Image (cartoon, rainbow, N blue to C red):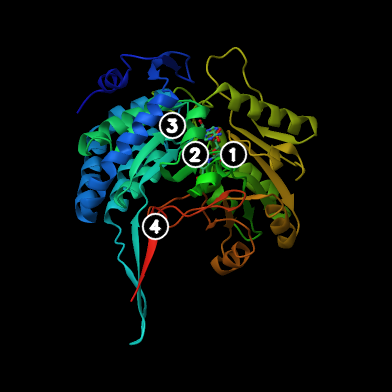
Amino acid sequence: MENHTDILSKITPTTGERRTILDPATGAEVGEAPVHTLEDLELAISAAGAAQPQWAALGHEARSAALHKAADAIESNAEELARILSREQGKPLNGPNARFEVGACAAWLRAAASTPLDAETVVDDGESYAKIYYRPIGVVGAIGPWNWPMMITVWQLAPALRMGNTVVVKPSEYTPLSVLALAHVINKELPEGVLSVVSGGREVGARLASHPEIGKVMFTGSTATGKEIIRSSADTVKRLTLELGGNDAGIVLPDADPAVIAEGLFWGAFINTGQTCAALKRLYVHTDIYDDVCQALTSVAAAAPMGVGLDENNVLGPLQNQQQYDIVARLVESAKDSGARVLLGGDPQADQPGYFYPTTLMADINNDNPLVREEQFGPVLPIIRYNTVAEAVAMANGLDVGLGASVWSSDLEAARDVAAQIQAGTVWINKHGAVDPRIPFGGAKQSGYGLEFGVEGLKALGVPQVING
Ligand code: NAD
């Protein structure tokens, strides 16, 4: 076991260009990250290409054993990894935040290692015999965002490695240390070249997406970048899994009990201080219980402490970067200007260090307000009143993204009926954003395509081959 300053010192570059990473809560230095170049990317891709045949030849059992050992290594270094993550990303240690994220890394590695995937017999009728096998793709590129940098990197690399591919990761330029630290720990259990991290800027991501030696790109990030990746990968016809932006709707039916659902609504929206792809970002509440839901949600939200991540008391943190802070501040201002009612927050303190934006709830807001239509990705929730369920469903479906959604009701069957009408990759009932390594996850509309997790997630990291005869 290493302490977190040991891990940081091991990943600090000794040569080449480097960049100082600052804590978004305090502005203090966290560490130094390498600024890798396109030449570094070439070296990583050729090392990954060289290592791949042997890694594939190990077979599922040996690769799974290595992934379980990597999960053990994460668990033995969990506190150190959580501290690095908390300081770089900003998320608190407690709540569904840094310690939770590191725990999820081990859990998803184990799930990818343990999920069986056998060849499937598709026809066997005495005349024809055909079977589908899932072969390794080769070298997989993994490009990730800054909000859940460790967990999303594991979502991408775990199934890729399990299926016999080698992986080159390009972390977000905002959170390279978290991913480098994670890979440092995992790599103790993997052969040389099987997993590498190229900590560069957008040009490194763009080259990874167009590189002829990359067979597949796993991408999680904004819809705008996803579209660029589709374009840059076109010439080499790469396989893609695209987990893109969302603007998840929640619909509270008139029979829901506000006191019972308030806590779930709060964490559905404010997990990771709202910086979560599948967080609740617009809440539609029936007029009969609108005021009660607003009141119950305000009480829960007002009681959630926000502050520096390493303080054990906090469960909400800062925005990760200035750019995101500016987006949130702009959208709340536009809502206030339109006459929406501030239930809580909306009054950032300019003189305070760090990118803290207060927990904000906005009521009586129009459905076409920018705070509703754009992905705010911060600790803000607009609450929209509706009169009929058909109207709520139409508003929920009114955008061109569809990652997650939720329906809240005391009647499970009624909630399922409404869920079936919503255009989203996942519709949760009486919860929002709960992911599970056994349950496939992916987007509808411009929230992307391809599934992660479970057997479907493993299949997505293989090339299907049919042997007919
Ligand atoms: P982003 O698209 O700005 O960046 C993501 C990654 O893409 C970064 O590593 C970046 O360097 C890289 N990149 C930038 N330009 C590139 C290019 N032309 N080619 C290849 N790579 C390039 O996203 P972000 O701001 O880091 O993340 C926030 C967004 O991600 C939000 O929209 C959020 O909803 C989405 N997200 C989606 C999921 C999901 O599972 N669907 C999960 C987390 C985040």
Q: Decide: marks 1, 2 in contact (CB < 8 A)?
A: yes
Give the labeled residue for mark 1: 228
The yes-or-no answer for disc 3 within 8 Å of ligand 1 is yes
State which tag comes first along the sequence, 2 or 4. 2
Report if residue 203 is visible in the image: yes
Instruction: Report, in whole angstroms, how far the alpha carbon at label 4 lies from the one at label 1.
Output: 24 Å
State which tag comes first along the sequence, 3 or 4. 3
Task: Identify the residue shown where x is 55% and y is 52%.
Answer: 443
Could you tell me which quadrant the N terminus lies in? top left
- The mark lying in front, picked from 1 and 3, is 1
Image coordinates for residue 190, horizontal then vertical, percent: 23, 39
Callout 3, which amino acid?
A: Pro
Q: Is residue 118 left or right of residue 396?
A: left
The yes-or-no answer for disc 2 within 8 Å of ligand 1 is yes
Which element carries disc 3, helix, strand or loop?
loop
Residue lying furthest bottom: 126
Give the labeled residue for mark 3: 171
Report if residue 86 is visible in the image: no
Give the labeled residue for mark 2: 209
Q: Nearer the viewer, residue 18 or 343?
A: 18
Task: Identify the residue shown where x is 29% and y is 50%.
Answer: 164
State which tag comes first along the sequence, 4 or 1. 1
Instruction: Report, in whole angstroms, how far the alpha carbon at label 1 lies from the one at label 3.
Output: 17 Å
- The mark lying in front, picked from 3 and 4, is 4
Callout 1, which amino acid?
A: Glu
Instruction: Report, in whole angstroms, how far the alpha carbon at label 3 lies from the one at label 4.
Output: 25 Å
Give the labeled residue for mark 4: 463
